[in-house]
Image: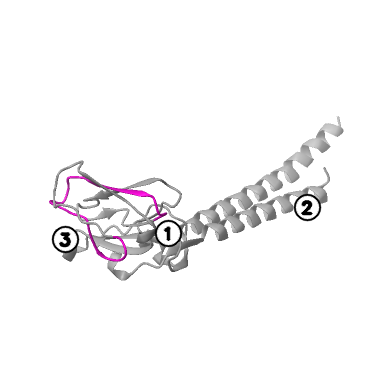
Amino acid sequence: MKRREFMRTAGGSAAAVAATSAAAGTAAAQEVRPVWPSEVEGNVNSYTDARGQDEVTISVGAGDGLAFDPTKVWVDPGTTIVWEWTGNGGDHNVHAVDGPASFETEITGEEGFTFEYETSEEDAGITHYQCDPHAQVGMHGGLAVGEDIETEEVGGANTGWPENVHDIGVPLHAHWVGLITAVGITLTCIFTFYVLKYGESAHTGHGDR
């Protein structure tokens, strides 16, 4: 392959890598989430989009024992929510205090204790619930049901991390996309340099024999 043709090919490959990575970064940076009321911003503050799932489990007594995890969940009507006690943090309950859904459990600290609630069309919207014994220390949660709720686009796809990891202003995924792009372009340049410098010399030497 001639030097000029090889450079065009290598340059095109690097540009393709960069364009693909940039597109992936843009896609990863956009996610639609419910607009949650401030009251549901509880400890751990994790979020799960469980739409399309028949059942989702929420840990009671997560983190340091004083949190629901995931803290905020978006589900379809007909989804069964299972709250499962970890046994940590003392005695807890699950009590809906604001919103369309209505549920309240006994207060217990028994590990493995569960409470199930099947959502319905009547629960459409956002319900704020809490642990009554630990409401003052931030043990709150949110349950969004259905599509008829206010939403917003936020940066970064769901990673399972608390949402405050995105407070740096750039989605977490974008950092990895940028790093991969830089590494790919660097390797392409190094490869091009060695092929042009040593590959061409080796070919010339072989022809002189």
Q: Quadrant of residue 129?
A: bottom left
Across and down, in percent, residue 164 comes to 36, 63
Alpha carbon separation for disc pair 1 and 3: 26 Å
**Type of residue at label 3?**
Asp
Q: Quadrant of residue 202?
A: top right
Tell me the number on the disc at residue 146. 1
N-terminal of the pair, mark 1 or mark 3, is 3
Give me the residue at 46% from left, 61% from top. 147
Give me the residue at 26% from left, 54% from top. 68
Frontmost of labels 1 and 3 is: 1
Label 1 element class = loop
Q: Which residue is mark 3?
A: 132
- Residue 89 placement, left or right of 32: left
Across and down, in percent, residue 74 comes to 39, 57
Give me the residue at 83% from left, 46% from top. 2
Magenta region, residue range: 75-101
Neighbor class of circle 3 (other Cα within 10 Å; few <14, some 14-19, many 20+) is: some
Q: Quadrant of residue 24?
A: bottom right
Neighbor class of circle 2 (other Cα within 10 Å; few <14, some 14-19, many 20+) is: few
Neighbor class of circle 1 (other Cα within 10 Å; few <14, some 14-19, many 20+) is: some
- Residue 109 placement, left or right of 155: left
Q: Are marks 2 and 1 in contact (CB under 8 Å)?
A: no
In front here: 39 or 175? 39
Label 3 element class = helix
N-terminal of the pair, mark 2 or mark 1, is 2
Q: Which residue is mark 2?
A: 8
- Residue 32 placement, left or right of 41: right
